[in-house]
Image (cartoon, helix red, strand yellow):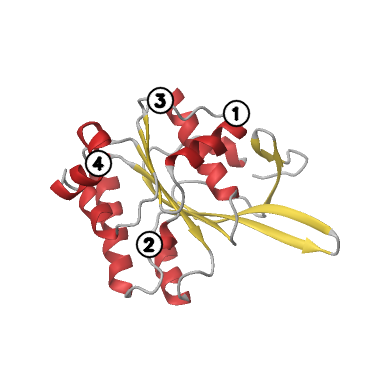
Amino acid sequence: MDLSIIGLEGNLQKGVLLIEEELGNIKSIFIQRIGFESIKLGKTVLYISTKRPKEDILTQMSAFGMDGKSEMFTILGDFKDRTTLLNMCYEDTPKYRKLYPSVASSTQNISGVDLCIVDTLTSLFIDVETHVVVDMLNSFIDVSRHSDTMFLLAADMGVCPERVERIMRSMVDGIIQFRTIYAGDKINRVINIPKLEGVLLPERMIPYHMTSEGISIDTRERVG
């Protein structure tokens, strides 16, 4: 993962990162850009969308100059089965093959890809017991540690109970938050990074703008 996209130096090869936003699609555009740049480097990407069909993902990517039609980029749209997602971490289950026969033979399981994106994870955890969330995150962490898979988990802030959100933030390796600050008639968009394993964090929030190519870091501010 190229950290220069968010104004930081260095790269991350594996880990579980939580990408948060207070309701909106900026986090989706961000992780789509990460996925697009990853396939350009020869990495395999599995994009799991819990809200939208594959066609909508491709349309949004195309609007920001990204081509998601690649053998290296697998999109599973309208994905709403927590159990199947958990099983995909470890094995090519019969249920997975039945639900997604066109990609099961090539994807097999999450541990077989370089980057796994779940957009959005919180849609799967509304009104569930805390241990379900913990089991899922522990599975992602196990796969990341043993298979060098990078996980980007998009989340809508304020959707899950506060305790669940705190647990998620405590378990993951890093947190990147896209925040919108309203000051009168002015909108300020900033990136907040509460933690990120192995990276020297900026001492203040990182300003950014939205352009036709997606997220553009405001270079007028010092970010490191």
Residue indicated by mark 4:
111
State the image quarter where residue 220 is shown: top right
Q: Secondary structure at mark 4?
A: helix
Sequence-first tag of 3 and 1: 1
In the rendered image, the vertical position of residue 55 relative to residue 40, given as above or below: below
For residue 9, say whether it is visible. no
Marking on residue 124? 2
Residue indicated by mark 3:
70
Mark 4 and mark 3: Cα distance apart in space = 19 Å
Q: Are the residues tagged 1 and 4 within 8 Å (C-beta)?
A: no
Dot 3 amino acid type: Ser
Q: Position of residue 222 (x, y in %)?
A: 72, 44
* Horizontal arrangement in the rendering, residue 25 relative to residue 212 (left or right): left
Residue indicated by mark 1:
65
Sequence-first tag of 4 and 2: 4
Sequence-first tag of 2 and 3: 3
| Residue visible at 57% across and 31% down in the picture | 62
